[in-house]
């Protein structure tokens, strides 16, 4: 009940601790505003922190993300809640919003945790590691991933056997199974929505055989395999651990496809696939990589040169629409496709297929506003009510949108969007002060 | 109530029992871990060799094996003559602390 909740006051509530939300929070904090950053995962950094390298520079994703994440985490004007959710936001008046924030128990006092991982070693439970997208297991007492922020353990209480082994080995006695959900009433002057995106579920296209054929995988799985914090000892095909030497990418898997409910382009799939193809050719020098595409959309600065570079490296590009994927007894896959340039239906064999899955809206945020409507666009992303003049503005005065919550975009655009949201929020807050 | 630091699991255990599927999952992991480690004790093996010997699907073996690699119980050996599959072996100083 609100009457019993701890009341907190900040200038701005930023919802989502990915790269866009983090950029907004950091800019606002640097201008002297007090910011509460609420992240539902156990670490800030969003999806970017899990990427291998970024296009078109091939800079290490973690090397770009971690200094920024650490700056956010250490900033005196930013308070971070991880593993927390927004229950409801009520607009109480001009420059006044009240939010109810639930802090789920981590069962670890993060201030005391040294990240020694002794609890992880002692824990007997092994479950699927969601941060490695199901490619390996993790313990029930675990640090989400090596560069997580905060780098502190958490207990997966749903899968914990309450054996107490983690507590017995913890040198700082920071594990606390008596923690419960805490609710806060947060009063803020403005809100930034930076809730990011979801990935398309390839099970919605049964003809690609995802899950049925174990060597059909997704680009996010490949991203993890290519990352320095990879789950396997090398790039391996998931069906039997073979080193793949003939890999196919299927672009527009779940994008530009009305039949699966996502008619728009995801903006990043062409370029991340080209990036992965280049990285694969570096990691597996003998491998052939073929990209099946409808159109290559290399629209950004340096993107077309990056595309040309991949062709020079030997990546094969086939303008073709995949009709069906079938599996051979040895786990290899037969792609039946329409070769658009040759005008004929043909087949090709590969030992691994990577589906370049698209970006979908992270739905649900509009439901938390109880007395105002956060308008969504026809594709269920947050609607930008004045996209040309004020791109962060939403249908609610004082609520701004940043990053892929407003639509698919790449990392530089997400950071720019986060910057725009912080600038518009500042302008809104300054109006309150006048 | 005074909470005994370092022994707090008992308080939650008293409040709610551990679900059966959680204990079943632990049993299943322990069983497959033992099976894999015992098989690798004989000699180093590739994923298809382990799958054939244990009569398990290759993807399941890879998942369990890579999990044991992550936990430091298994290590990667040489690649086979066809440059297709790595051999995996018990880690010489790997200690199972769980």
Image (cartoon, grey):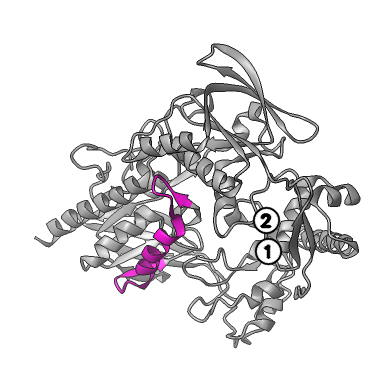
Quarter location, residue A143: bottom right
In the rendered image, is residue A88 in sight? yes
Same chain for mark 1 and mark 2? The answer is no
Instruction: Give left or right: position of A378 versus A27.
Output: right
Instruction: Name the residue rendered at 61%, 29% in the picture.
Output: A205
Dot 1, how many residues are within 10 Å of its Cα: few (below 14), some (14-19), or many (20+)? some
Q: Position of residue A54 (x, y in %)?
A: 43, 49
In contact (CB < 8 Å): disc 1 and disc 2: yes
Quadrant containing the C terminus of chain A in the rendered view: bottom left
Image coordinates of residue A417 in percent, x first then y, are: 29, 48
Question: Nearer the observer, disc 1 or disc 2?
Answer: 1
The quarter of the image holding the N terminus of chain A is bottom left
Residue at position x 38%, y 55% in the image: A19
Q: Provide the residue span drawn in magenta.
A: A53-80
Q: Which residue is mark 2?
A: A136
Q: Nearer the viewer, residue A325 or A27?
A: A325
Please provide percent x and percent y for residue A181: 52, 67
User: Residue at label 1?
Assistant: B70
Chain of the residue on which disc 2 is drawn: A
Quarter residue A342 falls in: top right
Query: Measuring 31% from the left and 53% from the top, which residue is drawn there?
Result: A192
Is any part of residue A253 visible from this angle?
A: no
Above/below status of A2 relative to A114: above
Identify whether A413 is placed above or below A316: below
Q: Position of residue A336 (x, y in %)?
A: 65, 21
- Regarding mark 1 in the picture, which secondary structure is present there? helix
Left of A328 or right of it: where is A150?
Answer: left
Q: Which SS class for mark 2?
A: loop
Is A122 contained in the magenta span? Answer: no
Q: Nearer the viewer, residue A119 or B62?
A: B62
Q: CA distance from mark 1 to mark 2?
A: 8 Å
Residue that lies at the very extreme toward the left in this rendered image: A434
């Amino acid at each position: 009940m609100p009457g019993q909740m701890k009341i907190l006051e900040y200038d701005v509530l930023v919802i989502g601790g990915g790269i866009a939300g983090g950029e907004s929070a950091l800019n606002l904090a640097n201008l002297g505003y007090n910011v509460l950053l609420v992240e539902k995962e156990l670490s800030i950094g969003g999806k970017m922190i899990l990427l291998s390298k970024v296009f078109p520079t091939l800079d290490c994703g973690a090397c770009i993300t971690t200094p920024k994440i650490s700056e956010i985490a250490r900033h005196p004007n930013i308070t971070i809640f991880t593993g927390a959710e927004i229950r409801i936001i009520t607009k109480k008046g001009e420059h006044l919003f009240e939010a109810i924030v639930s802090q789920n128990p981590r069962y670890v006092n993060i201030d005391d945790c040294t990240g020694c991982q002794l609890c992880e070693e002692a824990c007997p439970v092994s479950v699927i590691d969601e941060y490695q997208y199901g490619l390996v297991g993790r313990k029930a007492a675990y640090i989400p991933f090596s560069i997580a922020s905060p780098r502190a353990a958490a207990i997966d209480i749903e899968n914990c056997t309450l054996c107490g082994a983690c507590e017995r080995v913890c040198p700082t006695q920071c594990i606390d199974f008596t923690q419960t959900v805490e609710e806060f009433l947060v009063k803020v002057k403005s809100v930034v929505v930076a809730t990011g995106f979801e990935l398309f579920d390839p099970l919605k296209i049964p003809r690609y055989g995802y899950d049925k054929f174990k060597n059909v995988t997704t680009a996010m799985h490949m991203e993890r395999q290519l990352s320095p914090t990879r789950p396997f000892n090398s790039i391996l095909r998931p069906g039997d651990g073979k080193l793949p030497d003939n890999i196919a990418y299927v672009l527009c898997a779940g994008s530009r496809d009305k039949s699966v409910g996502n008619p728009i382009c995801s903006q990043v799939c062409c370029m991340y696939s080209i990036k992965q193809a280049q990285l694969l050719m570096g990691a597996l020098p003998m491998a052939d990589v073929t990209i099946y595409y409808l159109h290559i959309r290399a629209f950004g600065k340096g993107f077309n040169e990056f595309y040309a570079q991949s062709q020079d490296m030997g990546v094969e590009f086939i303008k073709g629409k995949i009709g069906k994927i079938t599996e051979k007894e040895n786990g290899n896959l037969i792609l039946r496709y329409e070769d658009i340039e040759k005008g004929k239906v043909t087949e090709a064999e590969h030992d691994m297929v990577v589906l370049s899955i698209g970006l979908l809206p992270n739905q649900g945020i509009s439901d938390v506003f109880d007395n105002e409507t956060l308008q969504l666009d026809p594709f269920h992303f947050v609607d930008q009510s004045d996209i040309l003049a004020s791109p962060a503005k939403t249908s609610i005065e004082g609520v701004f949108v940043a990053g892929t919550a407003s639509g698919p975009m790449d990392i530089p655009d997400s950071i720019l969007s986060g910057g725009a949201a912080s600038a518009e929020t500042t302008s809104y807050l300054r109006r309150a002060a006048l | 109530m005074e909470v005994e630091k370092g022994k707090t699991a008992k308080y939650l255990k008293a409040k709610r029992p551990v679900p059966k599927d959680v204990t079943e999952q632990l049993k299943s992991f322990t069983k497959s871990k033992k099976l894999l480690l015992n098989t690798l004790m004989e000699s180093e093996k590739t994923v298809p060799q382990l799958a054939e010997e244990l009569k398990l699907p290759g993807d399941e073996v890879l998942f369990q094996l890579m999990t044991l690699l992550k936990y430091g119980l298994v290590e990667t050996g040489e690649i086979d003559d066809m440059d297709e599959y790595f051999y995996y072996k018990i880690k010489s100083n790997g200690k199972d602390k769980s």
